[in-house]
Image (tube, rainbow, N blue to C red):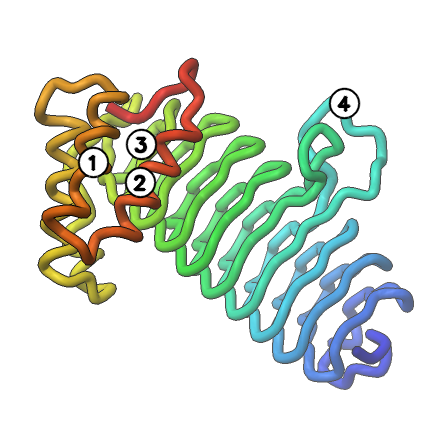
Amino acid sequence: MTMAAAAPGIHATALVDPQARLDSSVTVGPYTVIGPHVRVGAGTRIGAHCVIEGHTTIGRDNQIFQFNSLGAIPQDKKYAGEPCELVIGDRNTVREFCTFNIGSPGDSGVTRVGDDNWIMAYVHLAHDCVVGNHTIFANNSQLAGHVTVDDWVILGGFTVVHQFVRLGAHSMTAMCSLLLADLPPFVMSQGQPAQARSMNFEGLRRRGFSSERISAVKAMHKALYRDDLTLVQAQVRIAELTEKYPESLPDVQMMLSFLHQTAPQRGIVR
């Protein structure tokens, strides 16, 4: 990477600290402020009136629209200036008025966003959140601290997620959902608090899931939500699905791993 001041794509009114490291192909819009510990990879475009501060690393080919605040200190009264981080991967789109905070010393110290995510306006990622790849966050989705969002998750507009909640891969929330419990993989939820409504079958078809794998996901839904089983009993039933649906082995393993990590005091969305 080259020094920020050497990059020709930086607008004359932008304030980029000399210690920041921006690839020479990065563009920075008018009146944006970039702090000394910021690192930005090749091809990333940063709009006007953004503030990017803290120990923030941004990867390649991201498009960050105007009026974003990235890398500010966590909204945590215990934070005392520790050098925590925000790490953003490659090819993400971040629309207007988003706020991504750095991590906190009470956890990993890193707020992390993966690759190929589509993040719409007014989204908040609190400290120590971990977002995977290929997710979609609709406008005004809000994550409290320590939330984990796995790959291919879709959050409907105005979704609110309680701290420490986990969202499994391919899950989805409807508009104005309130998540107070873990949302297992594949599950579609809606409500305040959110309740399970179905599985994300259309999304799985679009991602190339075979009919056998989708049949296994339907059987998981039945075990979790239709057959009046305890969570332990449901896990036993789910583990047996690979005998009938051999192709579903990675999906079954993912579901069982997610359920095994669910804290009893939080439980899953029912």
Q: Position of residue 174 (x, y in %)?
A: 25, 39
Q: CA distance from mark 4 to mark 1?
A: 42 Å
Tell me the quadrant of the picture where the N terminus can be found: bottom right
Instruction: Report which residue position mark 2 lands on.
Output: 255
Dots 2, 1 in contact, CB < 8 A: yes
Residue furthest front as drawn:
243
Q: Is residue 151 left or right of residue 228?
A: right
Instruction: Report which residue position mark 1 lands on.
Output: 238
Question: Of the residues under marks 3 and 2, which one precedes in the sequence?
Answer: 3
Instruction: Report which residue position mark 4 lands on.
Output: 78
> What kind of residue is marked 3?
Ser
Q: Nearer the viewer, mark 4 or mark 1?
A: 1
- Find numbered disc 3 in the image and state the secondary structure of the residue it sits on: loop
Dots 1, 3 in contact, CB < 8 A: no
Instruction: Report which residue position mark 3 lands on.
Output: 177
> What kind of residue is marked 4?
Lys
Q: CA distance from mark 3 to mark 4?
A: 29 Å
Question: Of the residues under marks 4 and 1, which one precedes in the sequence?
Answer: 4
Residue at (61%, 67%) from the top-left corner? 47
Q: CA distance from mark 2 to mark 1?
A: 8 Å
Q: Nearer the viewer, residue 97 or 25?
A: 25
Neighbour tally class for label 3: few under 14, some 14-19, many 20 plus, Cα within 10 Å: many
Q: Nearer the viewer, mark 1 or mark 3?
A: 1
Q: Position of residue 24 (x, y in %)?
A: 75, 83
Q: Is residue 253 above or below residue 210?
A: above
Residue furthest top as drawn:
265
